[in-house]
Image (cartoon, rainbow, N blue to C red):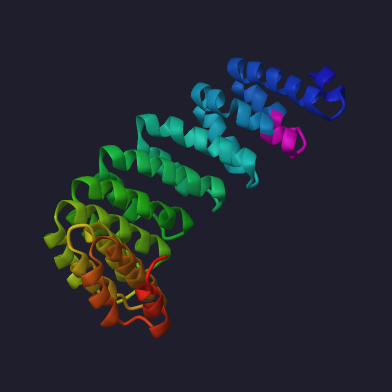
Amino acid sequence: MAYGAALPSGSARTNFMQTVASQMFEQDPVTAADWLRKLPDDDAKSQIIANVAGSWATNDVASAAAYAASMPAGPGQTSLINAVASQMASDDPAKALTWAGQLQDSPGKNQAVNSVISNWASNDPAAAAHFLQSMPDGPAQQGAIPSVAERWANSDPSAAAQWAANFSDSPQKAQAFSSIAGKWAGTDPVQASAWLAQLPTGSSRDAAVAAFSNQVLGSDPDGADQWAESISDPKTRQAQVTTILQKWMQTDSASATAAVQKSSLPADVKNQLLQPKQ
């Protein structure tokens, strides 16, 4: 190891240190972790951690978890947090999320929580959703809401919608509602529209309506247009109505033209839509 430390900075030194580190973490992760702590916090150290994270977490998840929790935020910590969370989650996703939830907020924490909860939701969305709702509000929890909602909506959009409604309005909730509405509209547009009809005005409803109107456009363009017109945010409404009418023009120009004329769009946008295509 002294030979590696004496090498000048560069790829040769980094490659040598990575090779030695890999062997050390395979044989004695605790001693290797002590050695790692003495290295300067630089790109080379981050590369070493990224290289050994998987084997370290596999051979000694406890020491890997402790070291990850002590690291400053950065690429190295992100690599190790994800490796630890993945290893823990293979046996007990709730344990992995409990550990990750205790870490300081960082990109690595958020990424790990999202990855573990998404995989869990693919197999047991109700359990994953229940656990996520019990986590403290923050970037990690908020960032995982859309992925859980999307996976749950594949099997039970009604349950996913009821769950997502428990969260306060945020871009993540809007994304979750969008996923739910799109998937529900594809399987049962009648029930999906009944859900939309009782949603309170706001950005989450707007996102859901936009996704629903996109999904039903092919089978019910008039309905898609009417739903798009119910979007509350003026800019979002104009963009969605324009998109719906543009696509409708391609399949039924006469009906779409009539819809354009009675739409809420500004005169200049109407004129553009009604202008004959060259």
Q: Nearer the viewer, residue 238 or 196?
A: 238
Q: Quadrant of residue 91?
A: top left
**Position of residue 32 measured from the top left corner of the image (x, y, whole percent):** 66, 24
Residue 41 magenta-highlighted: yes
Outermost residue toward the left in this view: 190
Identity of the residue drawn at 41% across and 76% down: 235
Does residue 211 lie above or below 129 as drawn?
below
Is residue 244 one of those drawn in magenta? no
The residue that appears at 51% across and 47% down in the rendered structure is: 109
- The quadrant in which residue 96 appears is top left
Q: Is residue 171 left or right of residue 80?
A: left
Question: How many numbered discs?
Answer: 0
Which quadrant of the structure image shows residue 259?
A: bottom left
Q: What range is drawn magenta here?
A: 36-46
Name, please, the residue furthest toward the bottom. Answer: 267
In the image, 73 versus 47, the foreground residue is: 47
Q: Relative to 133, does residue 256 appear above or below in the rendering?
A: below
Q: Residue at x 36, y 43 (%)?
A: 118
Residue sitting at 30 percent across and 75 percent down?
231
Please say if 1 is above or below 105: above
Q: Is residue 49 above or below residue 174?
A: above
Q: Nearer the viewer, residue 202 or 165?
A: 202
